[in-house]
Image (cartoon, coloured by chain):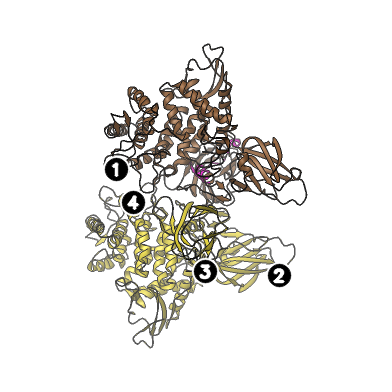
Chain colours: A yellow, B brown
């Protein structure tokens, strides 16, 4: 090991919790900041890093910290300031770095030829047993503090500059997460007011536009924001030079998709751009709004990400941040079902990457979270919300009297995860809980007449929504026969209200694909996502009603520009195409392995590259013949 | 209510936890920072403040936050930025301020004639039910953020300036917590290196002196430090003007003590100065070292403080900071007995001030802390430490085999507090636990032959130290007869090793006073504290061995200047004199009331003013006659 491998180290989870707060507090809307409305805290302020060395020769090392940290180095009983060279050895040398920091993560960087902050340091938090210190590939430079995530930059020039409404509108080729630079070309120009829009309509509507700001007087830059259009009222095109400095976390896309259907190719391409924009330090729901880390959105992002970047780190950062520390007192984003999806996320992540170390590290957190969940069941054994909990499931007209059936389906699925991964001796209890719960669901929520699970077992209304029935299919909680029954009596039953959110539409399309309705799903992909393309979408939207004209597409949540036009969950065609049509999936029986069985009759020509379980696979179909599958 | 009563508000406990971290991370020693070695965290990063108004007329208000906060105001469904005037009313107005902040406490200040941040706001943390927002008298100015505690300043000129060892030594009349100002009188003088000492010897020993620093080039000031002597090597007296800007939290001393014994008067006076210096934002152990908030030291400070400042706020700040948040996972300062002393502190505080609101607020934390303690008893029902716990009791040569008797005495006393204050229905269980524990202590630790409690019931060594026996007396855990037995067989038994720390000496002197040995204790006060005065002490020391010459008094913990020369626990004569000799004490049966029965035969002349339970009492004895007691 050499000093060249040194990097910043911190207590595991702290960096994620700190940056998650920064992310969740970064939403800005019409001049005000809107911090996410859930319990947000948890990075440690006082930690110690320890390591034992057996030195063959004298050596020296220097410990660096943030300037506002309170810290010292202990070496064999001596105490030393940080920032000074410490000489030690040969022989047994015990080094510990003690650090307290309030404003940010207490991280340290140790420079030295032999003693340096590489693999092998233990971290302690004065509460739990020592654990291996954490680090990552983004913070390897001694002069780059861990407080600011390093971003790569690409400069975009506007593709059009027009004079409109007494100002200038700058249009970029696509949506970006960019710092707009407004370089004055006339002396004495005060930094102008800038309106940034995801749509042209939004940028030009200075009364209702989400974002406005003035460039910094020194750097001429606005804060990083989602934008495609920039409108500068009262500014003539010749008074300023405007560029967008697109800033992004470097997570390479490893997927490519070309088939004989140009519309599908374009859908895949736009989904890739959409999802890439939402892959920031964490999986975001959308880049304009909410810019928050939601457990439900993150769960769905796992399905897309595995086929797009295959980057396990963003998944681990997101899951670590969502879960926070023990003892756990509140649910993920306050939402009970998002806690359950967090447990399900662990399984999805493990099945993709086979990372046992991460699973083991999270396992105590899964157990304590499940204990919290099991502790809030009612007298009948059904999961219900506590006073401040949010039992969400979906924006839908549920019969919310008593326990909600869909929530029990999530719980049953999560109990399955617990039973699968729990050590011997604990498995059986989770398995028994799941079996008992499934029996109770069957007894209380199954309606034989309607051949469907009803929302409520207490109201007597026997109201059917799609949600519980979809979850029974996607989590495999009922027999294949029952799944086919549900498809007929619920999924293809137009009397059951349609799913209205793309969030739950993901589960529904997944259920349909699982049951083999690939033609129907492909039709839907082309209608829904193709429909957005026909309206000129360059990124996929939070929601889309094909029946509305373009000018009515921007409103949502009662806000004329409330809709996010670049939303992660809208990238699901990547998953659907890769998983069910290209037919590639990780082999959950053999971590690292994969299976690939392209669906027949969908591609005459296909040249597709996808990551899977650490490898990259190329699938080629030529002239409708059997697919050639090769590894890159 | 008017806008003039507005002040900063925050979630209760957050300010204490934040400033406690600042305090506990502020220790500096020979160029390195030494953050306290216990779990340090817990102020909330995301809170909301809410209030409902019924407005008779239109009004307006403006919400202020720290510049790095993420926040907005919600008023009747509308969302507004902070820092702008919001007009509302007449009629029902619902206001909430949503704030997230990472680097410090998310506090808000609301300016307005009607709507302002005065009493009546509720605070929520997305975890627990709403509670009244907190504020205090130190943060009432809108332009004074809560991150820095406001200090008052007094300027001290040196009382002597001497040329020594090629430099200049500045001596101040007493010890201070001061920012040393070094104003250069010659152009081009670089800020010189400054050595600050509690003793002359320390300041002049540039190799071993605890503190050295360079004044800031712009302000010419050093950071605030404990100092009496400042040595500037290589600087001539005429090159700089040196002053000490003493900085202190404004907590007025309300006590005065004059009697016919000049030595006692001087002891009282120096104890007052010592203790005042240690009354910072929190009770500190010492002002040079550790500058940390220790639960054991804080417990003893309660006894002194009630007779000196009568300031309940510093007591509440200290106790709130020590305890942290629920769920509790670690002990106060990692020390099991300090957790028990925290529970005992609640009782001491309540008996002094009768503040039921504070007790009620802390009560759930007492219950959860006691649950943690009761959960770590061994199979015999005795309290033991977990792996990372520290069972301290005292620096003494205990027989630490198995459970330690003194720790069980602390537990029995704390159970008594729980039984006393618990609501009906819960009292009985704590009472039963205490009764059972006392029976077990008697059965396992009482040695009939030695007529003493032994340290260990498992080693078979039957080793006696004073500690458990002293605690049995001061907490009244055994009968008056048994207490007298213990005095004879332990306290006045020179075969039992003497207490070596002033920390436990406090408990011993208290026990002796309780048993009426006032002559003996007064002799000890004059020998020990008078002994320090004879050596020239201007503040009382962490420890004192009357048998050593002055030059050997500064060492402790194996460090030549390791001893703190201004230590809170050394101020106990204030308590002993006030409580047992002046005979003043709060009436625990009648909160706010007091009793005063001066001990006979100790004062020929006395003019003493002391706070007690919110009042100030003057006790005068003239010519040995009966005391006159009056309220001021």
Q: CA distance from mark 1 to mark 4?
A: 27 Å
Same chain assignment for discs 3 and 2? yes
Q: What is the chain identity of the residue bearing mark 2?
A: A
Tag 4's secondary structure?
helix
Q: Quadrant of the C terminus of chain A?
A: bottom left
- Residue hosting label 2: A238
Read off the residue under disc 3: A4
Mark nearest the camera among 4 and 2 is 4
Q: Chain of mark 4?
A: A
Which of marks 4 and 3 precedes in the sequence?
3
Q: Counting other residues with Cα less than 10 Å from the Cα at mark 1, is it few (<14), some (14-19), or many (20 or more)?
A: few
Crowding near the residue tagged with mark 3, few <14, some 14–19, many ≥20 C-alpha atoms within 10 Å: some
Labels 3, 2: front one: 3
* Chain containing mark 1: B
- Residue range of the region highlighted in magenta in the rendering: B1-21
The reply to whether discs 3 and 2 touch (Cβ–Cβ < 8 Å) is no
Nearest to the eye among marks 1 and 4: give it: 1
Crowding at mark 2 (Cα within 10 Å: few <14, some 14-19, many 20+) = few
Residue identifier under label 4: A372
Q: Is residue B318 left or right of residue A615?
A: right
Q: CA distance from mark 3 to mark 4?
A: 44 Å
């Amino acid at each position: 090991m050499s000093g060249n491998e040194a990097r910043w180290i911190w207590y595991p989870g702290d960096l994620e919790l700190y940056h998650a707060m920064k992310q969740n507090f970064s939403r800005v809307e019409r001049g005000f900041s809107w911090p996410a409305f859930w319990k947000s805290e948890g990075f440690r302020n006082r930690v110690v890093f320890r390591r034992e060395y057996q030195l063959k020769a004298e050596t020296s090392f220097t410990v660096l910290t943030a300037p506002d940290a309170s810290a010292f180095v202990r070496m064999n009983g001596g105490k030393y300031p940080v920032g000074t060279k410490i000489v030690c050895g040969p022989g047994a040398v015990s080094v510990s770095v003690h650090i307290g920091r309030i404003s940010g993560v207490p991280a340290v960087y140790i420079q030295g030829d032999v003693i340096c902050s590489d693999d092998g340091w233990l971290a302690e938090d004065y509460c739990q047993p020592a654990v291996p210190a954490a680090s990552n590939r983004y913070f390897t430079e001694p002069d780059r503090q861990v407080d600011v995530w390093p971003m790569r930059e690409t400069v975009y020039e506007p593709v059009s500059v027009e004079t409109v409404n007494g100002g200038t509108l700058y249009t970029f080729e696509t949506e970006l997460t960019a710092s707009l630079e407004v370089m004055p070309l006339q002396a004495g120009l005060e930094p102008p007011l800038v309106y940034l829009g995801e749509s042209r309509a939004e940028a030009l509507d200075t009364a209702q536009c989400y974002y406005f700001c003035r460039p910094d007087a020194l750097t001429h830059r606005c804060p990083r924001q989602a934008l495609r259009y920039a409108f500068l009222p009262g500014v003539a095109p010749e008074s300023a030079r405007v560029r967008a400095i697109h800033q992004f976390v470097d997570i390479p896309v490893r997927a490519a998709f070309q088939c004989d259907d140009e519309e599908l190719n374009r859908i895949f391409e736009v989904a890739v751009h959409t999802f890439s924009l939402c892959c920031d330090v964490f999986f975001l729901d959308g880049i304009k709004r909410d810019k928050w880390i939601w457990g439900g959105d993150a769960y769905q992002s796992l399905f897309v990400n595995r086929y797009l970047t295959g980057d396990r780190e963003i998944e681990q950062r997101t899951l670590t941040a969502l879960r926070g520390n023990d003892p756990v007192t509140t649910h993920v984003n306050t939402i009970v079902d998002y806690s359950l999806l967090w447990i399900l996320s662990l399984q999805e992540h493990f099945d993709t990457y086979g990372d046992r170390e991460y699973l083991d590290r999270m396992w105590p957190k899964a157990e304590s979270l499940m204990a919290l969940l099991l502790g809030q069941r009612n007298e009948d054994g059904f999961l219900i919300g506590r006073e401040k909990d949010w039992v969400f499931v979906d924006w839908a007209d549920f019969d919310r009297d008593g326990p909600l059936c869909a929530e029990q389906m999530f719980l049953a699925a999560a109990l399955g995860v617990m039973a699968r991964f729990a050590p011997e001796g604990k498995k059986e209890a989770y398995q028994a809980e799941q079996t008992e719960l499934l029996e109770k669901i069957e007894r209380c929520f199954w309606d034989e007449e309607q051949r469907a699970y009803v929302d409520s077992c207490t109201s007597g209304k026997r109201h059917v929504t799609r949600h519980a029935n979809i979850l029974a299919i996607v989590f495999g909680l009922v027999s294949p026969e029952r799944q086919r029954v549900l498809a007929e009596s619920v999924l293809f039953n137009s009397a059951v209200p349609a799913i209205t959110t793309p969030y739950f539409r993901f589960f529904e399309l997944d259920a349909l694909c699982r049951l083999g309705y690939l033609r129907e799903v492909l039709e839907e992909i082309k209608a829904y996502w193709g429909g957005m393309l026909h309206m000129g979408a360059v990124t996929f939207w939070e929601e889309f009603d094909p029946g509305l004209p373009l000018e009515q597409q921007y409103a949502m949540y009662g806000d004329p520009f409330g809709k996010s036009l670049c939303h992660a969950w809208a990238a699901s065609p990547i998953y659907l195409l890769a998983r069910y049509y290209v037919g590639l999936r990780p082999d959950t029986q053999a971590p690292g392995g994969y299976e690939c069985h392209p669906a027949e009759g969908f591609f005459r020509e296909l040249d597709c590259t996808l990551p899977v379980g650490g490898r990259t696979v190329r699938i080629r179909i030529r002239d409708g013949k059997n697919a050639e599958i090769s590894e890159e």
